[in-house]
C-alpha cells in the first residue's frame, strides 16, 4: 500500500534546515498577526508562508485564543512547538507589513535568521499614530456616529469632546496595563458623562443618544466580525472565545454608561428631526459613514495614505444600507447584509490597487454599521429590570430582547456578507 506523499521522507540534496528556528519564527509571525487583530484563516496562511518559505515540507497549526501550537516537518523529521499569545488588539499597519514580509519569505528571499531579524524590526519599529492624533480622530468618528444615530447638531460638539477625552484616557490606562474590562467601564463612564452633560448644556434634545455615541469608541467591531468569521471558516472554539470576550467588553461598557446616566439623570426627551429628501439623507449618511470609517482607521493604526480607501468603503457601506433601509423598506439586518456583501465584493477589486490588506478595507469600511447603540440599549434594558416591579417588566424586557436579537442578527449579517465574496473566491482559486 502506498503511503501519502506527506508521510514519506524526501531525499535531501544537502543538510536539512534546523526545525526549531523555523518553527519559532513561523509561530512568532502568527502571534504578531493575531495580536494585530487578524482572523484564524489569515494566521494559518501567514504561518504556512513563513514555515514553507524557510524550508518546511509540512505545516500544521492549531490556533487558540491565548496560544498557538505548530507542527512542522522536513522529510521524516518533525517538531511541535507552542507559543503564548498576548493581548489581542488591532494594528492594521503591522498587519500589512507582516504580509509583505511573508511574501518575501515565501519567495525564499530570506534566511531563517534574516526573517527573525525582520520580525524583530517590525515589532519594535512599526510606527503608530500619536495619542493626540488618535484621540482627535476617534472624537470625529464618534461625532459622525452621533449623526448616523440621528442625534441633533447641538450634540455633535459634546460627543466629539467626550469621545476625544475618553480615547486619550483609554490609551493612557492601557499603557499602564489596566485590565481591559475595567478600562472599558471607566472610559465609558467618563466619555458618556462629558458627552451627556455637554449635550444638555448645549440645548440638545438627544442627550441619551449623545451619551451612547460618546462611548462607541469602545465597541469591539473587528473582534465581533472576526468571531463570526472564525466560526464560519471552521474555528468554532476560537470564534466562541472571541464572542465571550466581546460580550464581556459590552457588559462593562454598558455599566459605565449606566453609571453616567444615573449621575446625570439623563432621560429620553422629545426629538425634533428636520425631515429631508431621501437623496439628501443618503448623501448625509454617506459622508458621515466615510468620516466614521476614517476615524476608526486611525484608531486601528492605518497609515494616512490608506485612510482614503477606508473612507471609500465606509461611504459605500452606508450608501447601500441607507438606500435599502430607507428607500426600499428592507429591515436593518437585510440592508446591513446587502451593504456588507457589496463592500466585500468591492474590496476584492480594490485591494490590489490600494495595496491594503483585505481585513483593513472591508472590516473598517463596515465598522459604521456595527450596532453598538443597540448593544448598549440591550444591556441597559436588562439592568433596568432590576429596579422595576415584576408587573411592569414586560415592556422593558421585550425591548431588551428585541435589541439583543437585532445586535446578533445585524453582526451576523455583516460578517456573512463580508465572508461570502472571500469564500467564493477561495473556491474558484481551488478549482
Image: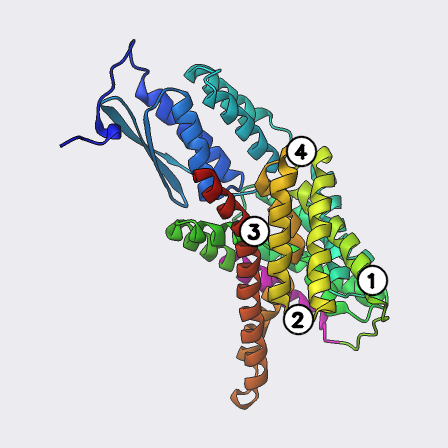
State the CA–CA distance, disc 4 to disc 3: 19 Å
* Magenta stretch: includes residue 82: no
| Picture coordinates of residue 82, whole percent (x, y) | 33, 34
State the residue in front, 376 or 74.
74
* Magenta stretch: includes residue 265: yes
Whichever of callouts 4 and 3 sits on the residue coming sooner in the sequence is: 4
State the residue in front, 233 or 265.
233
Q: Which mark is residue 353?
A: 4
Q: Is residue 87 visible?
A: no
Q: Is residue 23 left or right of residue 6?
A: right
Callout 2: helix, strand or loop?
helix
| Residue ID for mark 3 | 418
Magenta stretch? 248-268
State the CA–CA distance, disc 3 to disc 2: 38 Å
| Residue ID for mark 2 | 262
Whichever of callouts 1 and 4 sits on the residue coming sooner in the sequence is: 1
Whichever of callouts 1 and 3 sits on the residue coming sooner in the sequence is: 1
The residue sitting at 77% across, 60% down in the picture is: 147
Amino acid at each position: 500500500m502506498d503511503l501519502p506523499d506527506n508521510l514519506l521522507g524526501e531525499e535531501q540534496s544537502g543538510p536539512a534546515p534546523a526545525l526549531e528556528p523555523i518553527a519559532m519564527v513561523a509561530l512568532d509571525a502568527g502571534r504578531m498577526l493575531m495580536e494585530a487583530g487578524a482572523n484564524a484563516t489569515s494566521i494559518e496562511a501567514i504561518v504556512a508562508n513563513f514555515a514553507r518559505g524557510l524550508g518546511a515540507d509540512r505545516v500544521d497549526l492549531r490556533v487558540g485564543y491565548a496560544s498557538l501550537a505548530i507542527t512542522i516537518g522536513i522529510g521524516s523529521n518533525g517538531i511541535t512547538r507552542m507559543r503564548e499569545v498576548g493581548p489581542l488588539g488591532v494594528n492594521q499597519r503591522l498587519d500589512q507589513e507582516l504580509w509583505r514580509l511573508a511574501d518575501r519569505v515565501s519567495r525564499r528571499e530570506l534566511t531563517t535568521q534574516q526573517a527573525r531579524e525582520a520580525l524583530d524590526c517590525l515589532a519594535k519599529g512599526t510606527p503608530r499614530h500619536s495619542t493626540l492624533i488618535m484621540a482627535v480622530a476617534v472624537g470625529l468618528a464618534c461625532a459622525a456616529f452621533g449623526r448616523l444615530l440621528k442625534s441633533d447638531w447641538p450634540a455633535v460638539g459634546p460627543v466629539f469632546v467626550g469621545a476625544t477625552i475618553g480615547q486619550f484616557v483609554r490609551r493612557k490606562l492601557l499603557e499602564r496595563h489596566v485590565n481591559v474590562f475595567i478600562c472599558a467601564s471607566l472610559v465609558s463612564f467618563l466619555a458618556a458623562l462629558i458627552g451627556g452633560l455637554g449635550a444638555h448644556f448645549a440645548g440638545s434634545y438627544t442627550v441619551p443618544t449623545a451619551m451612547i455615541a460618546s462611548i462607541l469608541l469602545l465597541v469591539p467591531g473587528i473582534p465581533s466580525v472576526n468571531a463570526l468569521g472564525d466560526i464560519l471558516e471552521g474555528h468554532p472554539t476560537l470564534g466562541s472565545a472571541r464572542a465571550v470576550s466581546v460580550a464581556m467588553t459590552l457588559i462593562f461598557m454598558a455599566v459605565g454608561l449606566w453609571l453616567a446616566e444615573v449621575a446625570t439623570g439623563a432621560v429620553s426627551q422629545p426629538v425634533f428631526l428636520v425631515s429631508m429628501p431621501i437623496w439628501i439623507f443618503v448623501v448625509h449618511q454617506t459622508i458621515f459613514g466615510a468620516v466614521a470609517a476614517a476615524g476608526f482607521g486611525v484608531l486601528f493604526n492605518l497609515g494616512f495614505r490608506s485612510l482614503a480607501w477606508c473612507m471609500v468603503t465606509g461611504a459605500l457601506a452606508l450608501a447601500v444600507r441607507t438606500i435599502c433601509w430607507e428607500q426600499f423598506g428592507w429591515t436593518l439586518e437585510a440592508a446591513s447584509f446587502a451593504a456588507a456583501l457589496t463592500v466585500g465584493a468591492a474590496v476584492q477589486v480594490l485591494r490590489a490597487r490600494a495595496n491594503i490588506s483585505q481585513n483593513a478595507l472591508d472590516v473598517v469600511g463596515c465598522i459604521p454599521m456595527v450596532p453598538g447603540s443597540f448593544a448598549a440599549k440591550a444591556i441597559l434594558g436588562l439592568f433596568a429590570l432590576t429596579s422595576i416591579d415584576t408587573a411592569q417588566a414586560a415592556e422593558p424586557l421585550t425591548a431588551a430582547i428585541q435589541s439583543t436579537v437585532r445586535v446578533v442578527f445585524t453582526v451576523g449579517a455583516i460578517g456573512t456578507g463580508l465572508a461570502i465574496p472571500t469564500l467564493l473566491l477561495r473556491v474558484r482559486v481551488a478549482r
